[in-house]
Image (cartoon, rainbow, N blue to C red):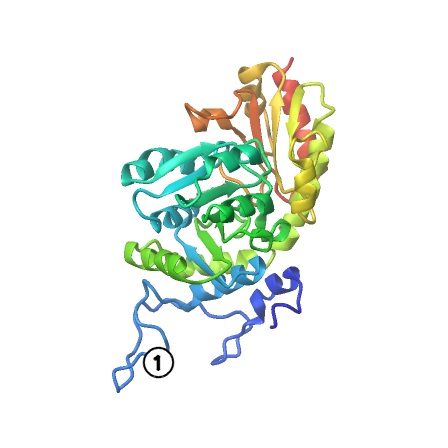
C-alpha cells in the first residue's frame, strides 16, 4: 500500500494492507520466536538475530504508527513511560531540557526527581505562553523541549509550530507527547516537531488491555539510534502478543476517535450549561483559552478528554464520581469505555489540578446515556 495515496482511516483499517506471504493470511501471524537461524556462511540475511531487538510483529505495529504520523520511523516500547523516559535517557548528563508545567503527572514526577538525579538540568515553564518558552530555552545549551498537547488534566493547548521554531532557534529538538491528540487529530511532525510520543496504552490500542508506548521521528540519525539502542540494551520492549493486540486495536482507531470526539463535544456543550458545573475544560469550547490554536492545530475534532469543575468543591466532586452508574471510576484514558476520575487525589502535591476537578475520558457509548449518567450523579451530589 502506498502510504501517500490512502487516507489514515484506510491505512489503519487494513494495518497497511500487509498479508503473510507464506500462508496468504490476511491477518499476519504473531511472531513469537526469540531467536533466528544463521545462514550457513555465518550471515543473518533475514536481518533478524535476537528477539530483544528483532520482532516482525513489533515492526508491523511500528509501520502503522509511522504511516499515521507521517514519520521516517517509529518504535514501540513496553509502556508510554518507557517511550518518554527513553527520549530523556538518550540525552547526556548536564543537558538542559524544558518541560511544561501542565503534563502527565508520573512523567513530571520522574523528570523532577530521577532525571534530575541522573544529571539532566530541567526547567519547567508554561509552554502555552510562547514568550515564557522563548525565555526558558538557552541557545546552545537546551537540547530538548518537551510538550504535551492537549495536556493533562486541564487540556491546555500549546502551539506546536511556534514551539518548534523556538526550540530549533536555540538548537534544541522538539518532542511532543501527543497521546490525547492521537495521530488522527494532530500530526506534530508536519508542524515541525522532531519526535512524537504516544502512550499507546490509550487511544492507539483503545481497549484498556495493553500497556504500550510509541515514538515516531521526523528523521532517523544519531539521536534516534541512541534511543533504539537504549530500548534494546535496557530491554524496554513490547512483547509480540501485546504488539499484535496493539495492531488489532489500531485498525479501528479512526472510528473510535471520531466517536469519542463527537461525544466529548456534545457532553462539553451540555455540561457547560449544567447548574452544578462551575466550568468545563475542553479545547472544543470557544471559552477554552487554547481554542483558537486547537482549531488550527487539530483536525476532525478536539479529542475525547475533558474535565469539569464541580460546584461545591472537592467533596461535591468526589460525591459526583461516587454516584455514577455508567462511567467507570478509574484512572487511564482512551478506551472504548468512559472513565471518570478525581484527578487531584492521584496527582498529589505540586499538582496544577484544582481539587474540584473531575477528569472524563469519553468512550464510544451513546452520548445521551453518558450525559444522563453525569446529570444524575451531579444531582445526587447536590441534594
Ligand atoms: C498514560 C500516559 C502516559 C504514560 O503511559 P503508560 O503507558 O501508562 O506508561 C504518558 N503520557 C500521557 C499523556 C498519558 O496519558
Q: Position of residue 29 (x, y in %)?
A: 46, 70
* Towards the viewer: 28 or 311: 311
Image quadrant holding the C terminus, namely: top right
Q: Is residue 285 visible?
A: yes
Rendered view: 24 above or below 131: below
Rendered view: 122 above or below 29: above
Image quadrant holding the N terminus, namely: bottom right
Q: What element does badge 1 sit on?
A: loop
Which residue extends farthest bottom? 41
Q: Position of residue 125 (x, y in %)?
A: 48, 32
Q: Quadrant of residue 306?
A: top right
Which residue sits at x=40%, y=58%?
Answer: 224
Q: Position of residue 162 (x, y in %)?
A: 59, 44
Q: Is residue 85 left or right of residue 117?
A: right
* Towards the viewer: 310 or 379: 310
Q: Is residue 47 left or right of residue 16?
A: left
| Tag 1 residue | 45
Which residue sits at x=37%, y=78%?
Answer: 46
Q: Is residue 13 left or right of residue 141?
A: right
Q: Quadrant of residue 45?
A: bottom left
Q: Is residue 328 visible?
A: no
Rendered view: 26 above or below 77: below
**Callout 1 environment at 10 Å: few (<14), some (14 to 19), or many (20+)?**
few
Number of numbered discs present? 1
Q: Position of residue 228 (x, y in %)?
A: 37, 59
Classify mark 1 as within 8 Å of ligand 1 or not, answering yes or no: no
Rendered view: 328 above or below 356: below
Amino acid at each position: 500500500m502506498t502510504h501517500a495515496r490512502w487516507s489514515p482511516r484506510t491505512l489503519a483499517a487494513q494495518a497497511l494492507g500487509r498479508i503473510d506471504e507464506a500462508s496468504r493470511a490476511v491477518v499476519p501471524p504473531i511472531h513469537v520466536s526469540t531467536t533466528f537461524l544463521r545462514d550457513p556462511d555465518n550471515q543473518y540475511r533475514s536481518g533478524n538475530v535476537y528477539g530483544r531487538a528483532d520482532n516482525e510483529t513489533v515492526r508491523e505495529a511500528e509501520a502503522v504508527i509511522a504511516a499515521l504520523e507521517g514519520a521516517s520511523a517509529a518504535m514501540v516500547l513496553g509502556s508510554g513511560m518507557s517511550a518518554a523516559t527513553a527520549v530523556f535517557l538518550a540525552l547526556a548528563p548536564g543537558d538542559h531540557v524544558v518541560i511544561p508545567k501542565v503534563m502527565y503527572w508520573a512523567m513530571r514526577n520522574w523528570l523532577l526527581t530521577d532525571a534530575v538525579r541522573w544529571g539532566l538540568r530541567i526547567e519547567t515553564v508554561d509552554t502555552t505562553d510562547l514568550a515564557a518558552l522563548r525565555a526558558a530555552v538557552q541557545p546552545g545549551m537546551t537540547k530538548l523541549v518537551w510538550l504535551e498537547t492537549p495536556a493533562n488534566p486541564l487540556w491546555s493547548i500549546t502551539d506546536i509550530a511556534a514551539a518548534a521554531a523556538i526550540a530549533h532557534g536555540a538548537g534544541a529538538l522538539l518532542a511532543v507527547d501527543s497521546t490525547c491528540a492521537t495521530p488522527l487529530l494532530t500530526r506534530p511532525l508536519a508542524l515541525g516537531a522532531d519526535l512524537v510520543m504516544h502512550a499507546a496504552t490509550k487511544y492507539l490500542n483503545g481497549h484498556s488491555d495493553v500497556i504500550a508506548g510509541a515514538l515516531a521521528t521526523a528523521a532517523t540519525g544519531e539521536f534516534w539510534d541512541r534511543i533504539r539502542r537504549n530500548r534494546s540494551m535496557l530491554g524496554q520492549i513490547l512483547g509480540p502478543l501485546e504488539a499484535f493486540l496493539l495492531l488489532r486495536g489500531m485498525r479501528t482507531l479512526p472510528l473510535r476517535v471520531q466517536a469519542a470526539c463527537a461525544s466529548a463535544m456534545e457532553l462539553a456543550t451540555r455540561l457547560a450549561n449544567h447548574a452544578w458545573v462551575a466550568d468545563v475544560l475542553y479545547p472544543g469550547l470557544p471559552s477554552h483559552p487554547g481554542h483558537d490554536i486547537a482549531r488550527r492545530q487539530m483536525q476532525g475534532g478536539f479529542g475525547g478528554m475533558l474535565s469539569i469543575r464541580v460546584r461545591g468543591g472537592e467533596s461535591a466532586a468526589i460525591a459526583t464520581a461516587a454516584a455514577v452508574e455508567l462511567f467507570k471510576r478509574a484512572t487511564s484514558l482512551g478506551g472504548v469505555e468512559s472513565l471518570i476520575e478525581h484527578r487531584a487525589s492521584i496527582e498529589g502535591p505540586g499538582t496544577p489540578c484544582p481539587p474540584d476537578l473531575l477528569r472524563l475520558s469519553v468512550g464510544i457509548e451513546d452520548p445521551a446515556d453518558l450525559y444522563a449518567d453525569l446529570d444524575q450523579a451531579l444531582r445526587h451530589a447536590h441534594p
